[in-house]
């Protein structure tokens, strides 16, 4: 071996990597600055310093927008993995519990995740969970993002699918005024209809599965979330479409009933996207998939 020391790569300062990762994830210097408690100018200087030290261009800049270059995209994967390992080491040395932040749709969180969290904690007692159900995407740091995609399978969906979204009409028993739950699908449309989207996606897909046109014969109400339509259903205002998994306890108690039980349609699926690679996020996604599998087996 030569008497000269082998040439070593000069590593960038850690704070430049943190600034680069935040700006890449959030797609904005302003949002990155807010998350890091810095000014946008300070974040910009950190990234420029990183680019100079690596002698590469990581972002294309235009007006107030930034976009990763191919080099930036390739480098981002290494930075994410490296920062995840550093954070893991900090937790182990300090004895701090691992923190996992999850962004997920409101109804999935309230009606599917929360009832199962105790089961998760039995196997992962050292993890503190933080849920985000409201706010603009990219407004704060998340480790796992749960996305919903219409259709099954969604060919352009990212992440791991863990739960299919089936739909069925549900209502309070009193709404039927003596009729049975196994009424004709066309008769369902004569009842007050509760929509969970403006385009009535769930109702149209269910009607397609029932081989009838979507033509409500009575009054209807339109909400912008499925949680709101379920609440309206529980108030006795009409018939809502809902994933029976989300309202299983209400169905078992008789608080609500499922109409036309022979007609159940798949609307789409939920996918988990890991933004912060590491053992804890990967274990959570594996747990999600296991819970989804158990639901399928229980049907």
Image (tube, grey):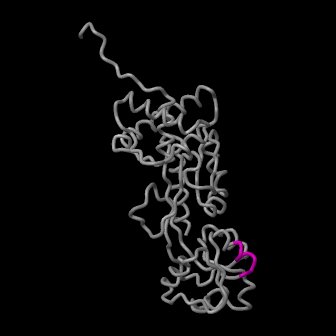
In the displayed structure, 21 sits above or below 162; it is above
Q: Is residue 184 magenta?
A: no
Left or right of 126 on screen, residue 149 = left
The residue lying at 64 percent from left, 78 percent from top is: 222
Q: Pinpoint residue 180: horizontal percent, then vertical percent.
A: 67, 89
Q: Which residues are magenta?
A: 231-237
Above or below, 295 against 257 in this view is: above
- Report the quarter where the C terminus lies: bottom right
Residue 18 is situated, as x and y percent measured from the top left of the image, at 51, 34
Measured from the top left, where is residue 146 in percent x and y?
A: 53, 56
**272 is higher (above) or lower (below) than 9:** below
The percent coordinates of residue 212 (x first, y second) are 50, 90
Side of 76 where 31 appears, left or right: right
Is 232 colored magenta in this rendering?
Answer: yes
Residues 168 and 36: in front is: 36
Residue sticking out furthest to the top: 3
Q: Along the line of sight, which residue is nearer the eye, 143 or 35?
A: 35
Query: In front: 203, or 290?
Result: 203
Seen as rendered, the residue at the extreme front is: 63
Q: Is residue 286 left or right of residue 190?
A: left
Q: Quadrant of the N terminus?
A: top left
180 with respect to 146 (left or right) = right
- When asked about the image quadrant of residue 239, the answer is bottom right
Residue situated in front as seen by the camera: 246 or 233 = 233
Residue name at image x 36 percent, y 37 percent = 57
Which quarter of the figure has residue 133? bottom right
The number of callouts visible is 0
Identify which residue is drawn at 43% across, 56% down. Answer: 158
């Amino acid at each position: 071996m030569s008497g000269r020391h082998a040439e070593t790569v000069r590593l960038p300062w850690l704070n430049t990597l943190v600034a680069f990762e935040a700006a890449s994830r959030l797609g904005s210097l302003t949002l990155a600055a807010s998350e890091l408690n810095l000014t946008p100018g300070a974040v910009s200087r950190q990234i420029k310093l990183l680019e100079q030290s690596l002698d590469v261009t990581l972002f294309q800049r235009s007006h107030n927008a930034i976009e990763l270059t191919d080099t930036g995209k390739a480098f981002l994967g290494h930075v994410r993995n490296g920062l995840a390992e550093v954070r893991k080491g900090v937790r182990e040395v300090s004895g701090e519990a691992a923190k996992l932040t999850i962004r997920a749709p409101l109804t999935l969180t309230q009606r599917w995740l929360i009832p199962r969290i105790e089961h998760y904690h039995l196997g992962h007692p050292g993890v503190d969970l933080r849920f985000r159900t409201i706010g603009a995407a990219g407004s704060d740091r998340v480790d796992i993002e749960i996305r919903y995609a219409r259709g099954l399978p969604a060919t352009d969906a990212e992440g791991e699918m863990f739960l299919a979204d089936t739909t069925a009409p549900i209502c309070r028993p009193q709404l039927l005024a003596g009729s049975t739950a196994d009424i004709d699908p066309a008769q369902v449309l004569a009842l007050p209809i509760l929509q969970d989207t403006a385009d009535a996606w769930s109702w149209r897909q269910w009607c397609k599965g029932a081989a009838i046109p979507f033509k409500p014969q009575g009054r209807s109400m339109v909400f912008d979330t499925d949680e709101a339509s379920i609440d309206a259903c529980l108030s006795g205002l009409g018939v809502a479409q809902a994933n029976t998994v989300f309202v299983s306890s209400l169905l078992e108690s008789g608080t609500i009933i499922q109409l036309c039980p022979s007609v159940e349609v798949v609307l789409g699926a939920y996918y988990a996207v890991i933004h912060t690679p590491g053992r804890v996020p990967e274990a959570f996604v594996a747990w999600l998939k296991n819970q989804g599998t158990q639901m399928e087996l229980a049907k």
